C-alpha cells in the first residue's frame, strides 16, 4: 500500500520513516512515497511537501503524527476530495476539533488513538475492569511524565486511561476529571479522577493509574522505552484499516480486538 506520513520531520514521524526505510523485509507491503511537513525538504529517497493536495493525491492512506490543526485540515481536505484512510496518533485536540473528526469519519475510514501501543491499550482494558470492580471506595489518580518538548497536557494517553476508568464506573469522564490541584480549597471529592502532570528531559512517556483505598493501594503502570513502539503500532493500525471498507472512527482497541 502506498503510504504518506504527515508530520514526517517530527519525533515520531522520523522514527516511522526510519523503521520503514531500514526494514524493507518486515515492511515490504508498505510503500512510503511522500511526507507532509511545515518546512519541506525532499531528500533523494523521499518527496516531502507542504501541500496537502499533493500529499494526498497519490497515496492509499496516511499515517499522521503532527499537530491538531494540521490533522483536522488534512482530514477535511481528504473528506472533500480524496477519501483515503487516515491513521492518526496526534493528541491535544479540543472538543470542537474532536467533533469535526467524528463528523468527517462518517464518510471516511479513520483510526485515531492517543496511544498506539499494545501495552497501553491493554492497560486501558485493565483499568476499566479494575475501576468497575473496586468502585467508589477507591480514589483514582493518574500521573504522567513526558519530555520537556511536549505541548499538550494531560497527555492523550492519560486521558484515554481516565476515560477507561470513568467508563468502568459508568461515570461521565468530563464531570469527574480534575486537572491538577492548587490552593486552599482543593480537597478531593468522592468519585473524582485526578490528573497530575510532570514534564522534563527526554522521557518518552510514563503513566500510572493508582487506586487508593483506606487499607490498600493498587497501581497499574506503563513505560514507553522507545518511539518505535508508536510507529509499529501505527503501521499495525494502517494494515488493519486498509481492509476496512466502512467509514467510521475506529480506536486501537478495535484494531487489537481487546
Ligand atoms: N498516539 C501515540 O501513540 C503517540 C505517541 C507519541 C506522540 N504522539 C502525538 O503525536 C504528535 C506528534 O508528536 P511528536 O513527538 O512527533 O511531535 P513533534 O516532534 O513536534 O512533531 C510534529 C510534526 O508535525 C509537523 N507539523 C505541524 N504542523 C504541520 C502542518 N501544518 N503541516 C505539516 N506538518 C506539520 C511539524 O512539522 P515541522 O517539523 O516541519 O514544523 C513537526 O515535525 C503529538 O500530538 C504527540 O502527542 C502520539
Image (cartoon, rainbow, N blue to C red):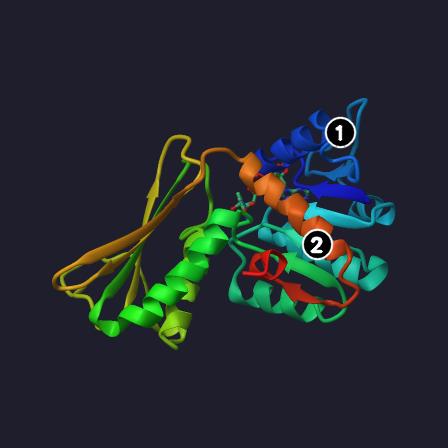
On residue 240, the disc is 2
- Left or right: residue 88 versus residue 21 is left
- Left or right: residue 177 versus residue 57 is left
From this view, report whether residue 151 is shown above or below residue 132: above
Where the C terminus falls, by quadrant? bottom right
Q: Residue at x 65, y 65 (%)?
A: 249
Residue 56 in view of the camera: yes
The residue that mark 1 highlights is: 24
Q: Residue at x 40, y 59 (%)?
A: 126
Circle 2 packing at 10 Å, graded few (<14), some (14-19), many (20+), is: some
Residue 207 in view of the camera: no
From this view, report whether residue 250 is shown above or below residue 12: below
Q: Mark 2 to mark 1: distance in Å?
A: 19 Å
Where the N terminus falls, by quadrant? top right
Circle 1 packing at 10 Å, graded few (<14), some (14-19), many (20+), is: few
Provide residue 248's location: percent of width, then percent of height: 69, 68
On residue 214, the disc is none
Q: Quadrant of residue 186?
A: bottom left
Amino acid at each position: 500500500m502506498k503510504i504518506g506520513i504527515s508530520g514526517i520531520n517530527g519525533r515520531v514521524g522520523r522514527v516511522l520513516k526510519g523503521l520503514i526505510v531500514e526494514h524493507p523485509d518486515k515492511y515490504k507491503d508498505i510503500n512510503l512515497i511522500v511526507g507532509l511537513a511545515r518546512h519541506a525538504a525532499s531528500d533523494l529517497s523521499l518527496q516531502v511537501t507542504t501541500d496537502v493536495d499533493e500529499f494526498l493525491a497519490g497515496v492509499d492512506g496516511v499515517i499522521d503524527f503532527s499537530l491538531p490543526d494540521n490533522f483536522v485540515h488534512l482530514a477535511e481536505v481528504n473528506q472533500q476530495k480524496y477519501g483515503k484512510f487516515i491513521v492518526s496518533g496526534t493528541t491535544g485536540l479540543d472538543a470542537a476539533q474532536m467533533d469535526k473528526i467524528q463528523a468527517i469519519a462518517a464518510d471516511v475510514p479513520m483510526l485515531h488513538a492517543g496511544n498506539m501501543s499494545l501495552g497501553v491499550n491493554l492497560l486501558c482494558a485493565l483499568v476499566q475492569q479494575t475501576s468497575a470492580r473496586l468502585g467508589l471506595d477507591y480514589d483514582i489518580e493518574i500521573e504522567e511524565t513526558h519530555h520537556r518538548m511536549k505541548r499538550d497536557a494531560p497527555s492523550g494517553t492519560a486521558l484515554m486511561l481516565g476515560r477507561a476508568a470513568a467508563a468502568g464506573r459508568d461515570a461521565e469522564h468530563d464531570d469527574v476529571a480534575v486537572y491538577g490541584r492548587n490552593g486552599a480549597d482543593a480537597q478531593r471529592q468522592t468519585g473524582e479522577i485526578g490528573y497530575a502532570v510532570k514534564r522534563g528531559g527526554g522521557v518518552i512517556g510514563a503513566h500510572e493509574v493508582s487506586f487508593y483505598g483506606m487499607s490498600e493501594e493498587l497501581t497499574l503502570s506503563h513505560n514507553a522505552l522507545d518511539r518505535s513502539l508508536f510507529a509499529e503500532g501505527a503501521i499495525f493500525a494502517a494494515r488493519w484499516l486498509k481492509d476496512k471498507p466502512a467509514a467510521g472512527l475506529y480506536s486501537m482497541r478495535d484494531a487489537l480486538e481487546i
